[in-house]
Every structure is written in C-alpha cells, then in structure tokens.
Image: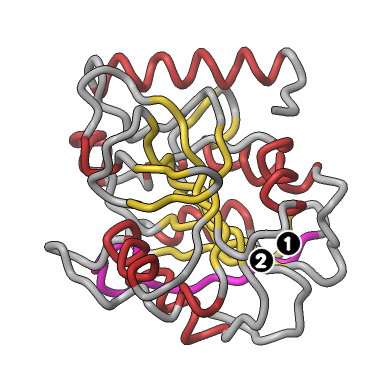
C-alpha cells in the first residue's frame, strides 16, 4: 500500500480505529468518515493542512494509517488530495496508536520530524502552521478539557516542556496532535498499557532524555469525546465544524 519517496515532511493521520464510542455506527462506518454536511469529518483537517502556506505539495506527503473500514478512507481520498500525495499504511492488527506510529517509523524510515494526529480530531490550518514552524523536534498539543475528562491524558508541564505526558497533574490534556522526531517514533512500542498507546511511550521517551515541548490550543474538537455524553459531543462537534466552515476557519 505504500510507496517510498524522498519527502521534506511527512504528515501522518491515524485512521484505523473501530470507533467503539459511536456505538453500532462503528460496524459499518469508519469514525473519521462521519458525515458533517456533505463531507466526511476527516476531510476538514486534511483540507486545512492543504491550505497551509508551509506545505510543499511537491515534496511533502500525507500518510493515512488505515485498518477498520479502510476501503472507505481509500475510496474517498484516493492517491492525492489537492496535489498532496497520499500513501496508505494498513495496521492489520489494531494494537494501539503507539503501534501505528511505530509501523510508520519502520515502513517509511523518516529522517526528519513528522506531524501526526488522530483522525477524530479537528485540526485548523493555523495549528498545523504552528507545529510546522516551531523549531522543537517533539511537541504535544495541549488544551483544557471538560469536567470529568480522563485523567490519563492529563499532562504536567514545567516551563516550556512537558515533564509528564501521561497521568499528569495540570489543567491541560493531550488532544492527539503531535510533532515527533524519528528518535521518539522509535520508542513507541517500549511500554504496553493494555495496548501500545502513544502517551505512555512518550513518557518513556521523556524518561530516556527526550525533550518534549508543547503547543497550547483553547479548543478541543474531537468525535471521540464522551462529555457530557457521546451523543451530545457529536452534535456539538458537527455544529462547531459547520460554524467554522461558514466563518472560513484558519485557527
């Protein structure tokens, strides 16, 4: 499914999950393909990426890690999106987000940092630009979370760096958008917490000496939210994305 080419920067979207929080919809629908108006949810973030003036369509590449209902993603986006080349990498066993990124590391062998995000997260153009232009090789994107949010994705920061990427103590949460160096990607299967997840392995990288900076955003728009309930979150996400669309979002 993949083609090895020389690229300036790889953008990686993790779109393999089964979307269990969508209930029975997940049986026949890849969650990132949830319709928002006449477009799948994932297209908004990919289009925002394509709008970034920092993107080099001739050299950059988008890698979509697919698994559950892969045919829906591949059939919709094809091999290019607005001139940006797309490669697909199949995660045959859904062993976690850390496992997915480690597959990217093994398959594409990036020599420079990548930008990666979860497919159920809405990412605005300006946020992509921030990660593109920041000099740090490792960045987490953080935001305040709703009351009752899972403390496992809470972080601790000290000055300009994250000191606890997992089960932290600040008011900020990891939203699922990162910049990772090849060295950090290499460590994504060091720890297994039920499955190989990004954040426990990012904490392992910190403990091994990697420095993790952060970007703060004030809005966390994602289909996987459960507060106040999964149904209410999805309604709020759809309304907000459509509002941003009308207003010409460049967050």
The quadrant where residue 182 appears = bottom right
List x then y, in percent, for residue 49. Answer: 71, 46
List x then y, in percent, for residue 223. Answer: 38, 32
Q: Along the line of sight, which residue is nearer the eye, 35 or 41?
A: 41
Q: Along the line of sight, which residue is nearer the eye, 23 or 72?
A: 23
Q: Which residue has dot 2 on it?
A: 86
Residues drawn in magenta: 84-98
List x then y, in percent, for residue 164. Answer: 33, 51
Mark 1 / mark 2, whichever is N-terminal: 1
Residue occupying the point 53% across, 23% down: 218
Q: Residues within 10 Å of mark 2 (few under 14, many from 20)?
A: many
Q: Along the line of sight, which residue is nearer the eye, 250 or 41?
A: 250
Q: Is residue 221 left or right of residue 136?
A: left
Q: Is residue 9 left or right of residue 77?
A: right
Q: Give the position of the C terminus as an image quadrant.
A: top right
Residue occupying the point 42% across, 73% down: 209
The quadrant where residue 20 appears = top left
Question: Residue 80 bears which disc, if any?
Answer: 1
Q: Is residue 251 left or right of residue 216?
A: right
Q: Reply yes or no: does residue 90 show up in magenta.
A: yes
Residue occupying the point 59% across, 33% down: 39
């Amino acid at each position: 499914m993949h083609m090895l080419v020389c690229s300036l920067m790889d953008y990686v979207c993790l779109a393999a999950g089964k979307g269990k929080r969508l209930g029975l919809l997940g049986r026949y629908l890849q969650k990132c393909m949830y319709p928002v108006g006449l477009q799948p949810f994932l297209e908004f973030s990919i289009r925002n990426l394509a709008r970034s003036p920092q993107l080099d369509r001739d050299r950059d590449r988008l890698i979509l890690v697919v698994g559950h209902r892969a045919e829906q993603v591949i059939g919709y986006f094809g091999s290019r999106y607005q001139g940006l080349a797309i490669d697909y990498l199949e995660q045959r066993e859904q062993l976690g987000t850390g496992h997915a990124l480690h597959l990217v590391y093994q398959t594409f062998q990036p020599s420079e940092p990548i930008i990666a995000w979860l497919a159920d997260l809405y990412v605005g153009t300006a946020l992509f630009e921030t990660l593109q232009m920041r000099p740090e090789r490792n960045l987490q994107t953080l935001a305040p979370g709703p009351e009752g949010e899972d403390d496992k994705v809470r972080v601790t920061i000290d000055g300009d760096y994250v000191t606890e990427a997992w089960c932290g103590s600040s008011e900020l949460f990891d939203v699922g958008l990162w910049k990772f160096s090849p060295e950090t990607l290499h460590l994504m299967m060091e720890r297994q917490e039920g499955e190989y997840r990004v954040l426990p392995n990012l904490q392992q990288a910190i403990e091994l000496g990697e420095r993790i900076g952060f970007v703060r955003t004030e809005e966390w728009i994602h289909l996987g939210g459960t507060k106040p309930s999964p149904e209410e979150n999805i309604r709020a996400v759809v309304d907000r994305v459509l509002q941003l669309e009308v207003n010409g979002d460049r967050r």
